[in-house]
Amino acid sequence: MTSQPVKIAPWLDAKQIEQTIENTRLPQPRKDPWKYTSVKQVLERLDNPFDETNELPAQNGSGVIIGDFGAPKISSLARKHVNQIANNSNNVLASLNLLRAQRGYAIVSSQRNDSVCPMVHIPASDSCERILIIVQEYTNLEILEHTTGGNRFIECLILPGGQLVHRRIQPVTTHVEYNSLTVNVMENSSYKMMQYSVGAQLRRNDIVINIEGEGARVDVSGGWKLADTSHLDTQLAVNHRAKGATSHQKFHGVVGDSARAIFNGRIYIARNAPKTDAHLQNKNIATSDGAAIFTKPELEIYADDVACSHGATSGQLDEQQIFYLRTRGIPDDRSRELILDGFLAEIVEHDEGASVLGIQPRKVDGS
Amino acid sequence: MSNNIATTPEELISKEYTAGFVTDIETETLPPGLSEEVVREISRKKAEPEWLTEWRLDALRRWEKMEEPTWAHVKFPPIDYQAISYFAAPKGDKPKSLDEVDPELLRTYKKLGIPLHEQKILAGVEEEPSQPRVAVDAVFDSVSITTTFKETLKEHGVVFCSFSEAVQSHPDLVKKYLGSVVPKTDNFYAALNSAVFSDGSFVYVPKGVRCPMELSTYFRINAENTGQFERTLIIADEGSYVSYLEGCTAPMRDENQLHAAVVELIALDDAQIKYSTVQNWYPGDENGVGGIYNFVTKRGTCRGARSHISWTQVETGSAITWKYPSVILRGDDSIGEFYSVALTNNRQQADTGTKMTHIGRNTKSTIISKGISAGHSSNAYRGLVRMNPGARDARNYTQCDSLLIGSECAAHTFPYIESRRQDAIVEHEATTTRVSDDQLFMCRQRGIEPEKAVSMIVNGFCRDVFRELPMEFAVEASKLLEVSLEGAVG
């Protein structure tokens, strides 16, 4: 077998990856984790050509290096981490992304003298991309990401003491979109993620967060507002593999018309992860009878000295609340809007999120 | 119901699986293996009508094409279905009265604390005076030994007999309802059961009758290398009420034995069925050798308006439990309930939970599940709450809590929620904690021994479920937990 380099990562052998794909079983349709979303549509999307135009992210402030995998200062890190952070040996979709990706680039935070946190904007792109994010020891980084209809795999490593704030905005798109994100969080580092989504023909977000170091903190929140026939599937797994870490996950969703919202939140606690504090909450409101909500908050626990909980609800707007507003002269439609806005505002922390969900941002001081 | 329960701490510490003895009795057993011939033979032994033989054969053919489910969170070596004997019964004709029953069998039930003598219970002799009247169907391996209080029940029009008897005496009811809740192709184990089911209980409560006493079936596996495949069918006609209890034990053996039962409940308009189980199959030893594989399909259907089905289970036995008592809420305003305590110790594995399918309007379901893991065991709750598009104003509340005792055990929760209805409300909450040092310290400080203290804490944790059990079962259940937890704290 002659070797053939992968376009975005020439040190990897494409033939070998193809071979792995052939030998690996494809995800099974109608079974977990593809029970409610068509894996066929995602595979078809990966088989069709993507938009060729994509650009490197824009940055604000110093203390961050951005460049293609082959760029100086990046290439050695890329060789070490690309396709290594996420354990992708059995993941056909990850391998396909690696072969099809038109661009692969890295975002690396570095030590700096000022205290301003650098911000990087990953632009929306209807292309196939592979991104590596490395937050170096005791540095911080803020990422604002837009996704629209492409195929994006992000591998992220937060080294000890590092801090990453990741805001992901998912506006309307008519495409099939598949995003995969794997974050490895090392000791005393923190990862905060917020994800706000509205409609798409089919949008699937796989998020895996591995807590590999003691005392790490993970905070993931998000919201969705779906209408028409949009389909959103979020699969979130937080794997606690080190002791004394905390993770909080909170998602609120509003589902209308004939839209479908799928949420699978999993907390895994390994035997060597005592003193873990992990909580997950998912609340949904359906605003029409055609809307479908599928949620599964999972716990998989192998250590006894832990505090874990999860909760999930699905329901409609509270008639009492609507009545309260009606008695104050607010029309029915506006009352419903206000209550839904309030429900989503609980998970929105900044303007971009509020604007994509179409609500008024909540003021930090609660006023 | 059982008098083989420890009452003092000393007794508790020396307590083992007391139901693990073997009854030395001559048994008629079919040779191991499963084929059309075996199925025909079982059917012939029970003198079944042609339609039922065909029904069994159809199930067998379909089973042969099915694959064993692998999604459950349990691990076990492949089962050789051709190495199991599918029929075992004490030798001789079926006894016509208790006097004809083999004395060895009567001793077995006495030892297990199961009352088979009606008159003694009535007269209050030899039994605890507080013992309430319970009609018992005793199933030993593949056959029913006796059913008590049949006459008393008959006066009220209640049919309570073994399944084989019902096939002969009430063929229309059996034909109408058999497989109507759990179709023969429902799943791998249900298909297997449909092909080879041996005995079980049959209950029919006529319109407007409130069953005058608790009905109970006691299942006992005794023979070696056999499986038990009982089939239970309970029909509550309009406006009736029945409370049914189920208990099970097996001898201690080094090999695993398969128990694949099917239970079908049908509640018509305004009927209520309360089904309680205390499952105490042999769980295997502390190294995980032996024990029963308990792969059971239990489902009820609230077919009529305002009907009500309630499952209460206390699961302490079995090497592996794979069991999801479910309710299909078809009738408007019907109610489904599931109360469960599942305890695993040593190397036991449990994957248990429930499914509530809301179809009718204004249907309500409640799920309270308490999982306790100790030793090296693994305990998973797996549930599904589904709100179909027609389930207007349906409501579900689920609470599932896990308690971990020891650092080597595991607790999992896999709740599926599927809502296709705007006005349906589903709430699910789950917590996982351990018996805290503070709680233990508090008890120890007051002179309570560690094991007793853990028992008390566990009993408190399970209170919501025990409250739902019939009184005498609740006492047995809480004692059973003490026995099962023995050695879990050190």
Image: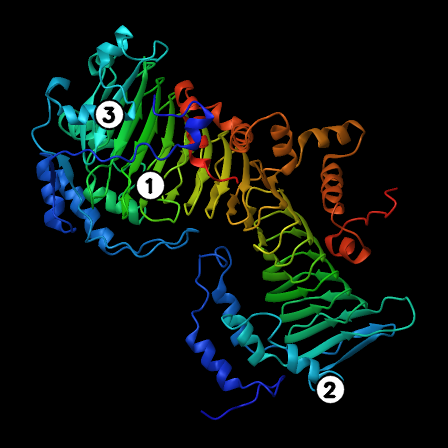
Q: Is residue B165 above or below residue B431?
A: above
Look at the numbered disc 3 and give the secondary structure of its residue: helix
Of circles 3 and 2, which is in front?
Answer: 3
Look at the numbered disc 2 and give the secondary structure of its residue: loop
In this orientation, which residue lies closer to the viewer: B23 or B166?
Answer: B23
Q: Residue under circle 2?
A: A71
- B374 left or right, relative to A352: left
Of circles 3 and 1, which is in front?
Answer: 3
Residue flagged by tag 1: what amino acid is it? Val
Q: Residue under circle 3?
A: B109
Residue B210 is labelled as none
- B274 left or right, relative to B86: right
Residue B296 is labelled as 1
- B259 left or right, relative to A354: left
Give percent across and percent down for residue A84: 60, 74
Dot 2: few (<14), some (14–19), or many (≥20) neighbours within 10 Å?
Answer: few
In this orientation, which residue lies closer to the viewer: B456 or B179?
Answer: B456
Between the residue at mark 2 and the residue at mark 1, the CA separation in whole angstroms equals 60 Å
Give percent across and percent down for residue A332: 72, 35
Q: Chain of mark 3?
A: B
Give percent across and percent down for residue B92: 7, 30
Q: Are marks 3 and 1 in one subunit? A: yes
